[in-house]
Image: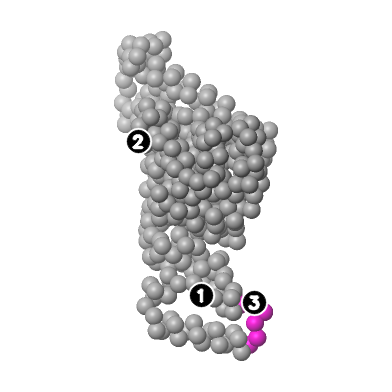
Amino acid sequence: MKSAMPFQIKLKKFSDQQVDRASDQLGQELETYPFSAVRSERYFVDGFEDLRSDLEFELSQKIICIETLQQVACKGLRHGGEMRPLVWKILLGYLSVNSNSWEDELTQHRLKYTQLKEEFLASPSQCTNKEEKEYHANGLLRRHEVTNGDHPLNLRNGSTWNQYFKNAEIAEQIDRDLERTHPDIEFFSVNSPISQTNQAAMRNILLLFAKMNPAIGYVQGMNEVLAPLYYVFRTDSSEDNTLHAEADSFGCFVQLLSGFVDNFCPQLDNSSVGIHATLSRLSQLLKANDKDLWDHLENSKVNTQFYAFRWVTLLLTQEFEFHSIMTIWDFLLSNPLGVQEMLLRVCCSMLLCVRNELLQGDFAANLKLLQHYPEVDLRHLLDVASNINSL
């Protein structure tokens, strides 16, 4: 698997003397400092910093320094988007920091996904046919007996076919939601030939997740959280990786949801880890950073549940243009504090970035503003989020 990339130092429009001097200086530093220390530093040549080279360099190492990778990725991978699939897999823990293990890890993950699909997504009749083929392959014949529990007309709770039909209902809900997933983008649009393959893969992922997690099941909105992951992996520049985008997306989707799945569980809504507690923490975060704005929203009865419920549960996928979501997720996934913590800081930053408009607005105006968040400078938004005071 060709994941390593050559390290290239790019010097732009410098004189020969400047280039020689910078090269000599860098050579001396490489000899003077421990290798790990060199990798953790940023190098400037007359004020120029090439994040892309930093990223290429880090991904070319046998052992990835996760702290350095996080530092680079949090700036956004706009100039290294082709490396985003690999970076996200590492940041989500789907791949280890040992690049020599990546090929084996991917093979194991993808094989496991194939096995899970066969186990959970096959219909009872498909399972029976498979058993029969395996039996006949050994040169044996047998008479297949259909028990009451195996019969399609037996819809009692606990029967195989009863569960299968319940899953079919979940699949129908997933299909309806997938039809509404970014319909303006050809990659997802139901009117696009390419989208049929994409929607089928996303359907498998969401249905498999629901069947493997019956306490949570499928919750409307999970399709929106899956969409950026699947898009990134399906548009990978590696043909082999695109062929396995479904398996990789499933693994990363599970990893991502594990950090905030409680927000999707209605039974935990009023607990200390449920969505209401998360929204309350956002309110307190705003209060700690801008008491005047918090007072105004409180006095005008603009409760966080009216606007931030969607922000938090859908990881901001409905508030920004689709490709901007990629940059936001670079930021969310790369912070050692965790996705949910940084998500709340970005949400708080969103409020601070429209502070003047909110202070001048009443309940109706502010609710409309926050439910249809305006276009803002994304880099500034994330910079503000980085400087949010924690509780």
Q: Residue at x 44, y 43 (%)?
A: 284
- The kind of secondary structure the magenta stretch mainly shows is loop
Residue bearing the label numbered 1: 43
Mark 2 or 3, nearer chain start: 3
Residue 44 colored in magenta in the image: no
- In the image, which disc is placed on residue 356? none
Neighbours of disc 3 within 10 Å: few (<14), some (14-19), many (20+): few
User: Residue 14 in the image: x percent, y percent?
Assistant: 65, 82
As for residue 11 lying within the magenta part, the answer is: yes
Check disc 1 and report its element: helix, strand or loop. Answer: loop
Q: Eyeballing the image, is 116 above or below 76?
A: above
Q: In this view, does 187 lie to the left or right of 122?
A: right
Residues at marks 1 and 2, CA–CA distance in whole angstroms: 44 Å
Q: Which residue has dot 3 on it?
A: 12
The residue wearing badge 2 is 272
Answer yes or no: is residue 119 visible.
no
Q: Residue 181 is drawn in which quadrant?
A: top right
Dot 2 amino acid type: Ser
In the foreground, 98 or 272? 272
Q: How far apart are marks 2 and 3 (CA)?
A: 53 Å
Q: Residues within 10 Å of mark 1 (few under 14, many from 20)?
A: some
Placement of 288 over or under 203, stated as above or below? below
Q: Three-letter amino acid code at disc 1? A: Tyr
Q: Position of residue 140 (x, y in %)?
A: 31, 26
Amino acid type, residue under disc 3 in the picture: Lys
The stretch of residues the image draws in magenta is 10-16
Kindly report which numbered mark, 1 or 2, lies closer to the viewer in this rendering: 2
